[in-house]
Image (cartoon, rainbow, N blue to C red):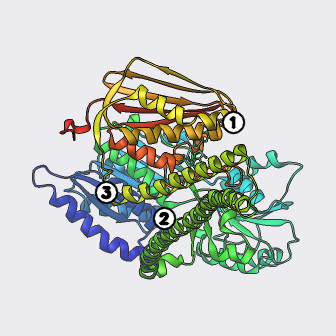
Amino acid sequence: MRRGITDFLCAALPLLLLAVSGAAHAAEPRKVLILNSYHQGYKWTDDETRGVLSAIGHTKNVRVYVEYMGTKWSSDQAYFRQLRDIYQSKFRKIPFDVIVATDNDAFDFLRRYRDEVFGKLPAVFCGVNFFQMEDLAGHDLFTGLNETAEFKENIDLILRLHPGTKTIVFITDTSISGTKTHDLFVQAVPEYRGRLNFQLLEDVTMNDLLETVARLPDGSVVLHTFFFKDKAGRIFEYDEGIELISAASRVPVYGAWDFSLGHGIIGGYLTNGLDQGRGAGEMAARVLSGARVEDIPPVMKSPARLMFDQRQMDRWGIRRTDLPENSVVINAPPSFYAVNKGLVWGVGVGMAGLTLVVALLARLYRETQRAVRMRDEFLMVASHELRTPITSLRLSLQTLQRAERMSAKVGAELMSRSVGLAARQGERLNRLIDELLDVSRIEIGPLPLDLRDVELGAIVRDVVERFEGDLSRVGCPVAIQGDGAISGCWDRSRIDQVVTNLLSNAVKFGAGKPIEILFGEQAGTAWLTVRDHGIGIEQAQQARIFERFARVVSIQSYGGLGLGLYVSRRVVEAHGGRIRVDSQPGSGSSFTVEIPRAEPGGGERKE
Ligand code: ADP
């Protein structure tokens, strides 16, 4: 990882410098010095530098200089004085606009030598451990970010991921930073008194520490901060100590700084160099944009973020879904998508195509099924409808034949009843065949109309007269209420057919209750309503009844091919009009026809 960041910096810096200098033909670029306490390749420092660069990168016309003091290797007062002298010569000709100091040594160096070396110019710090406002007493033009650890957040996180925790084992060393970390941790403890025990592992040798963590009982969790130097004076790199501790520990190990991540901690709410650098870079960018450094107060709450290591999560059985939102996970296996991007897209596109084809096929299948179902229904209804009058007709004829064979004298009344019945059944057959023929005519092309001047009231009276026998048989009175002599240019027999259909339905579905036929005229359009008070039609079925073969009642209860309203609609439409229904189940139905009185399209009329 260290090499990766080093490579990134080596590649990115010249590019950045080039980019900013390229834009600087017009005005002299502003200049920023990043003064790092430590060396390039030290992860914490590399992260801070990356953070500063990413925040300043948005500012136009800036040139960034990056300097490393190397105080991990040498840090006595004589060395700092030498650095002062070197920087005085090295940066003599470079008038910086702002300096960003990362970590305590650079911060201390600037407090001491800034004015001498660089002049009194704005300085922004980050990574300064346990910063206090008093640290700036007597030092002008400084602002920056405190660096601490977030212990309350980390204890709460441990309790969330390990609800059975009884003891938290706290590890830090006895350096100045370790002592300050200890004080900070102790401040967080009282809130958990009674709920949690705390065990501090501080002034110990690494061997004792490893032996202790290897024997910790269940219900313990380790919270590790840093352990750079043990009681025996042994020094450990930031990654060495934690790797030993994590490997030896019987219980999960959490951390507080991100430099331990990837080296044995499960994770934590981690203080990190990138956010420190980014915060300082944002402050420097504000100074470059004209803000006064005195107006930018230091940030006391150290930025931190939730970070986890998948490898340690696997070791301790923590699932990704257990983590709080906004958690960053390192060492996560690449997702199936990332590994097989091409395959996923190929399969995705293929699946989408297939889904489309399947959906189309399913629709076709449904439509075919529906057509087959309608055909079967129609055949069943048609055979029933045709057979009924034929059977009845045959019975009437048999009665007459038998009477004739037996030379029996058939009474005049019986004779007239049988002949009347036969005539009615013949009539019914005729109507059914006409309906079927009409449907095939309509399917072939426009319905031919024989248009003449016709009077609507006369048609209504004719139809009702023809129905008199049926009406008196079912005992159903019909009231006609017409508005004067309304005439129009219509096909008389077709309008008669419409009124006949509507009245025959009203008789069939009217439950023997009174029927009203109303008609009139409005704005050149004749209207006619046939109203019954019978079974009515469900709202959801009302649009369907004007379709072919649409029947919404059972064939056992009511006859009919389900064609009458379809043919009526086509006849009315051929006249340029429309037909609609208004119905309530159980209260009855009103069918209204509206037809323009003039010839549709104003065409020539056949005489
Ligand atoms: P049918 O010849 O089978 O009556 P129609 O096309 O005339 O066919 O009617 C279609 C369907 O509409 C009928 O089967 C019936 O369910 C419903 N319907 C038509 N008129 C009425 C009415 N006045 N009251 C209740 N239902 C009706």
Residue 479 placement, left or right of 547? right
Q: Which quarter of the picture shows residue 141? A: top left
Tell me if the residue at label 2 has its CB under 8 Å from ligand 1. no
Q: Is residue 480 above or below residue 191?
A: above
Q: Is residue 97 above or below residue 305?
A: above
Label 2 and label 1: CA atoms lie apart by 121 Å
Circle 1 sits in a helix, a strand or a loop, which is it? Answer: helix
- Asked whether the beta carbons under mark 1 and mark 3 sit within 8 Å of each other, the answer is no
- Asked whether the beta carbons under mark 2 and mark 3 sit within 8 Å of each other, the answer is no
Q: 196 or 516, which lies in front? A: 516
Binning the other alpha carbons within 10 Å of mark 3 as few (below 14), some (14 to 19) or many (20 upward) gives few
Label 1 and label 3: CA atoms lie apart by 38 Å
Whether residue 267 is visible here, answered yes or no, is yes
Q: Earlier in the sequence, mark 2 or mark 3?
A: 2
Q: Give how far across and how far down residue 400 sits, in percent.
A: 69, 57
Q: Give how far across and how far down residue 413 sits, in percent.
A: 71, 43
Residue at left offset 37%, top offset 20%: 485
Return the residue at label 2: 76
The mark found on residue 445 in the picture is: 3
Q: Give how far across and how far down residue 41 sits, in percent.
A: 44, 74
Residue 358 placement, left or right of 256? left
Binning the other alpha carbons within 10 Å of mark 1 as few (below 14), some (14 to 19) or many (20 upward) gives some
Q: Which quarter of the picture shows residue 389? A: bottom right
Q: Quadrant of ligand 1?
A: top right
Residue at left offset 46%, top offset 54%: 434
Q: Earlier in the sequence, mark 1 or mark 3?
A: 3
The mark found on residue 49 in the picture is: none
Q: Quadrant of the image for the C terminus?
A: top left
The mark found on residue 474 in the picture is: 1
